[in-house]
Image (cartoon, grey):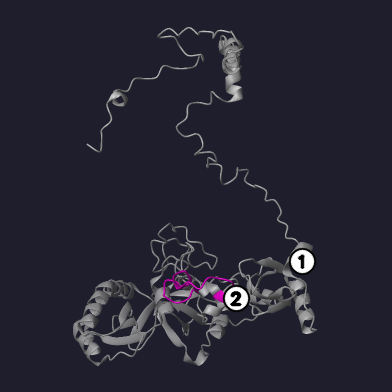
């Protein structure tokens, strides 16, 4: 039995019914669940005649176990089977078969002697009972949280899982301290009338069971492919020159992100050639201490103790030479000279996508021409206006009159009387406009001293 796409038995199966919400029958599809394993040995012929009779079976969320196929049933990925449990039996989906199961058992340190056995392929009654008890999980979780809150227990019930036959229910919870379950189990047994099993999980396991979207925009690693949770501390962020901000470094689980360890080894290899950050250089101008480092550019920034505002970037090879001089008892050259010898040059970046600069939407001279008329005073615009309208009338005559007024008059020379301009005549400039009359300007000013 499979998910309905009729190809879930193939190890290289890519479910054709997948959509944005996943496979419609995700409970039974062999390749549509979290933490799936790709069987890369499916098309490789087994060198021995004996085949591996152990299969990996998936239950709810990320819970997986190994079972032995003692009856030689034709099992493939996606088969719904009934397996041994304590008490009764459980129903699960085969997630992996073949020789790769031995590799997974070795990875998880599962001894072959402790493996339980497969009873049979699940019949219709087993599947109906399985789906019926799976439908009770959400109401049971809500009721269990109410009971725990009523008893004032410092715990959080994360998930509830019923056994395939309904004979046992497992409550997964998180708590920072020890919890007294004596009264809680009595309340649960009276409310649900089945065997109760309590399992404490960590905050990372809680995030793996619930799932979600990380700050990178992708699904959480712990709920898709990550199975081993390595310890993460703040030193991983310091080695990678990240700011120690708990809000940015913490994941959905409230702990440090697991992805901080992904590139840590590369940073550690690169930092082996760097001098320690506590290095102090004894120069002719005084002592200088390290401000910061750049792993990718292989540079270190130093500043004088007396003038810490000015920073000087140096290559790590130059820093090693200066440290060697200090060990000999010699003072090294000032930081300015080292900077002058090996100046930092930046290559001009090319626009690969053929776009203009980032400030293409900014107006550089936005505040200079506010409240002014069009550029009629510019030489180019004035030349265009003169070409279109002709030269200014009587321009030379007006200049001559101004010079005559400014020159001193000789003795006996009478002053030249200028005729008054008739009313309504336009100004000297052809572009001059008549000012509008504003009645507010003619109103008498108010005397504040009155």
Q: CA distance from mark 2 to mark 1?
A: 30 Å
Q: Residue furthest front?
A: 411
Q: On screen, 8 above or below 361?
A: below
Q: Nearer the viewer, residue 124 or 20?
A: 20
For the N terminus, the quadrant is bottom left
Question: In the image, 282: left or right of 150?
Answer: right
Which numbered disc covers residue 337? 1
**Residue 247 picture location, percent across and down:** 44, 70
Q: Secondary structure at mark 1?
A: helix
Circle number at residue 239: 2
Q: Which residues are magenta?
A: 237-257
Q: Secondary structure at mark 2?
A: helix
Other residues around mark 1 within 10 Å, as few (<14) / some (14–19) / many (≥20): few
Q: Residues within 10 Å of mark 2 (few under 14, many from 20)?
A: some
Regarding residue 244, the answer to whether it shows in the image is yes
Task: Give above or below for 5 relative to 287.
Answer: above
- Give the residue displayed 73% in from the left and 72% down from the top: 316
Residue 36 drawn above or below residue 349: below
């Amino acid at each position: 039995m499979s998910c309905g796409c009729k190809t879930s038995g193939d190890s290289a199966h890519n479910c054709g019914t997948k959509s944005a919400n996943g496979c419609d029958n995700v409970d039974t599809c062999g390749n549509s669940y979290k933490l799936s394993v790709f069987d890369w040995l499916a098309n490789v012929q087994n060198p021995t005649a004996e085949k591996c009779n152990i299969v990996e079976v998936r239950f709810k969320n990320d819970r997986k176990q190994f079972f032995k196929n003692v009856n030689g049933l034709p099992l493939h990925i996606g088969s719904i089977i009934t397996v041994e449990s304590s008490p009764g039996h459980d129903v699960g989906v085969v997630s992996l078969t073949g020789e790769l199961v031995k590799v997974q058992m070795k990875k998880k340190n599962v001894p072959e002697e402790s493996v339980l056995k497969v009873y049979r392929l699940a019949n219709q009654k087993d599947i109906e009972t399985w789906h019926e008890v799976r439908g009770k999980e959400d109401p049971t979780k809500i009721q269990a949280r109410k009971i725990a809150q009523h008893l004032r227990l410092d715990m959080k019930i994360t998930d509830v899982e019923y056994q395939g036959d309904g004979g046992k229910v497992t409550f997964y919870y998180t708590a920072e301290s020890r919890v007294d379950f004596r009264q809680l189990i009595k309340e649960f047994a009276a409310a649900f009338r089945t065997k109760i099993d309590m399992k404490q999980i960590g905050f990372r396991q809680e995030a793996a069971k619930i799932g979600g979207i990380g700050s990178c925009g992708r699904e959480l690693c712990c709920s898709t492919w990550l199975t081993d949770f390595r310890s993460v501390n703040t030193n991983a962020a310091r080695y990678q020159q990240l700011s120690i901000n708990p809000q940015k470094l913490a994941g959905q689980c409230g702990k440090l992100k697991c992805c901080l360890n992904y590139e840590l080894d590369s940073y550690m290899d690169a930092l082996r050639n760097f001098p320690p950050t506590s290095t102090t250089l004894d120069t002719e101008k005084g002592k200088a201490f390290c401000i910061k480092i750049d792993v990718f550019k292989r540079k270190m920034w130093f500043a004088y103790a007396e003038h810490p505002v000015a920073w000087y970037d140096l290559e790590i090879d130059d820093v090693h030479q200066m440290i060697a001089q200090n060990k000999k008892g010699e003072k090294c050259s000032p930081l300015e000279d080292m900077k002058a010898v090996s100046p930092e040059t930046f290559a001009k970046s090319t626009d690969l996508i053929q776009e203009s600069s980032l400030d293409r939407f900014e107006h550089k001279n936005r505040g200079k021409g506010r409240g002014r008329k069009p550029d009629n005073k510019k030489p180019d615009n004035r030349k265009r206006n003169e070409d279109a309208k002709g030269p200014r009338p009587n321009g030379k005559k007006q200049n001559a009159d101004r010079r005559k007024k400014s020159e001193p008059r000789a003795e006996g020379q009478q002053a030249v009387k200028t005729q008054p301009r008739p009313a309504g005549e336009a100004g000297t400039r052809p572009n001059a406009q008549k000012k509008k009359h504003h009645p507010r300007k003619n109103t008498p000013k108010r005397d504040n001293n009155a």
